[in-house]
Amino acid sequence: DGGITQSPKYLFRKEGQNVTLSCEQNLNHDAMYWYRQDPGQGLRLIYYSQIVNDFQKGDIAEGYSVSREKKESFPLTVTSAQKNPTAFYLCASSMGHGNTIYFGEGSWLTVV
Amino acid sequence: DQQVKQNSPSLSVQEGRISILNCDYTNSMFDYFLWYKKYPAEGPTFLISISSIKDKNEDGRFTVFLNKSAKHLSLHIVPSQPGDSAVYFCAASAFTGGFKTIFGAGTRLFVKA
């Protein structure tokens, strides 16, 4: 089955900790994305990557970091610098501009 | 700076009637537009898209209309069904922006039986 797999589904973070959300796709897509959704709000772009070893900041990149060492993988690290990390995080991928973006099932991050 | 705006946070429609969801954008460089449907705690699922060379695209009960001069697009669902109740997101991208796709805030559709 082709798709996008995010893990874990639920994650709890203590204050001051870094946590990493995993995203893997087997769709052979070039582009990958991370979005954040807060309750009652839309999707805001954190980072995106057009090709391996390249990525760009989205609209709310502060406090986050990413890597794109493999085409299939685009992990997101939520650092302690992110002051309000509790949210629903969505990973997505596409063949590129002008193509449909497909989403994973999302990961809930809660700060405790 | 909201480049993609969905000004109606919610919409309520009777089953069998038409649902019209609206979206406005400010960046004239956007040339590809998409609509997604999202249920709580799930990832959005793709519904329909349109490129800027067209003004209409239809897929079953879903039709998207694009008015480039007004920088406006709309999604029509007819007939509406209770299972259509969800949050609908409009999205747009521009070739000059690379692969960056911007989403609106979403409109929650309630279809009453």
Image: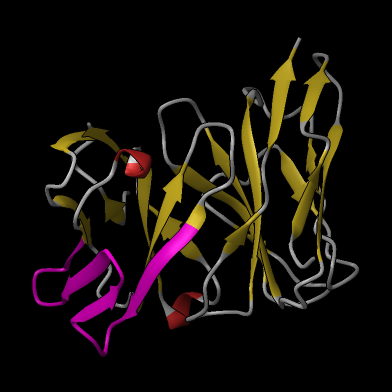
What colour scheme was applied to this rendering of the protein? Answer: secondary structure
Extreme-top residue of the structure? A112
In the image, what residue occupies the spot 67% across and 41% down? A106
Q: Is residue A21 left or right of residue B83?
A: right
Q: Is residue B66 left or right of residue B2?
A: left
> Was residue A68 drawn as part of the magenta stretch in this picture?
no
Q: Count up the numbered dots.
A: 0
In the image, what residue occupies the spot 48% across and 38% down? B39
Q: Where is residue A81 shown, x and y percent of the image? A: 73, 29
Q: Main secondary structure of the magenta part?
A: strand
Q: In the rendered view, tell whether residue A84 sits above or below residue A15.
A: below
> Was residue B51 drawn as part of the magenta stretch in this picture?
yes
Q: Is residue B46 left or right of residue B72?
A: right
Q: In the rendered view, tell whether residue B52 sits above or below residue A100.
A: below
A106 vs B17, nearest the viewer: B17
B112 vs A99, nearest the viewer: B112
Q: Where is residue A9 shown, x and y percent of the image? A: 77, 33
Image quarter of the C terminus of chain B: top left
Q: Is residue A6 left or right of residue B49?
A: right
B49 vs B17, nearest the viewer: B17
In the image, what residue occupies the spot 38% across and 68% down? B48
Residue B98 appears in view: yes
User: Which image quadrant for residue B81?
Assistant: top left
Residue B33 appears in view: no
In the image, what residue occupies the spot 58% across and 46% down? B43
User: Which image quadrant for residue A79?
Assistant: top right
Extreme-bottom residue of the structure? B53
Q: In the rendered view, tell whether residue A53 sits above or below residue A89.
A: below
Range drawn in magenta:
B46-75
Q: In the rendered view, tell whether residue A8 sits above or below residue A86.
A: below
